[in-house]
Amino acid sequence: KATAASFPPFTHDWATAGTARVMGDWWTHRKDFMNLVMQATMAKLASAPADVNWPIVLSTLANLLEQRHIQFYSTDPAVQTWVEAQAWGGTLTPGDGDYLLLVDSNVGFNKATASIAQTLDYQMIVEPGSNPRARFTVRYRHLGAPRILTCDKFAQYAPTYDTLVQGCYWDYVRLYAPSGAELITASGGDEPVETLSELGLTVFATSLMMRPGEERTLVFEYRLPDRVLHNGVYRLIAQKQAGSDSIPLRLTIAGVSASGLPLRDWTPQPS
């Protein structure tokens, strides 16, 4: 288990106090503490099970699984099949209808994700004579204190966690949609949207950079394949990025039905 004597090598003060070689060693092993903590936890559970508050442990585990903050993987195919049946393995599950998954990846070598607030708005628009159209809007807000800041992701690693959280935010954004979705227009990113194919899904990808205090809005408009409406029934699977907070999602279905009658907007409460 981790001890007071073994812990200092994993702190930043130790790493920056010496030579480039020492810094390199720190960078390679900076997250070794996670393994030490896990080993100590497992040893505690195995050596003194009677002293463990199992109701708290199990309820915490269940909550983390339900909120998709942790995932399981097993090399045993039978066990892995069971894990995926519980939706605990992180598998993408597009189904037969509409599908939506937003994936944000911080590529800025810091912890600024903790300072980012988001809201999601998804509109599915039905138009007679053509495939349904989707309009997805994601709004970002950097909660860090506004200040003049030079954004350089390749600068020296910040000395404290608070500094890492308050830094500039570089986000590689991917929006997963049903296979066959076709981009109509997009706005708000720092680069043109790229259309990719991954795991049987269509992916729209771009990037953005935000300074503390800034707000940004990305909008993707795309044509959906006709299979998202099957016999007049619309089904949407909105999958949550593993490890992310619960982000509010507003869903609106609008347009004109095949009979010419207007569809009523529907805005469910986020769960």
Image: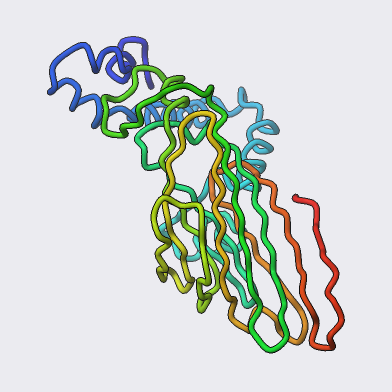
Residue 179, how many percent across, how many down?
Answer: 51, 76
| Observer-nearest of 63 and 134 | 134
88 relative position to 18: left or right: right
Q: Against 72, is 54 above or below?
A: above
Q: How is the image coloured?
A: rainbow
Residue 235 can be seen in this image: yes
> In the image, residue 28 lies at what x, y percent?
24, 32
Looking at the image, which residue is at 48% across and 48% down?
104
Whether residue 79 is visible: no
Which residue is at a point 12% across and 23% down the rendered structure image?
A: 21
Residue at 18%, 27% (x, y): give it: 24
Q: Which quadrant would the N terminus be assigned to in this image?
A: top left
Foreground residue among 207 and 48 = 207
Q: Name the image quarter holding residue 43.
A: top left
In this picture, is 268 found above or below 106? below
- Residue 40: quarter of image: top left
**Which residue is depicted at the point 25% across and 29% down?**
27
47 or 104, nearer to the observer: 104
Residue 219 screen position, x and y as percent: 57, 57
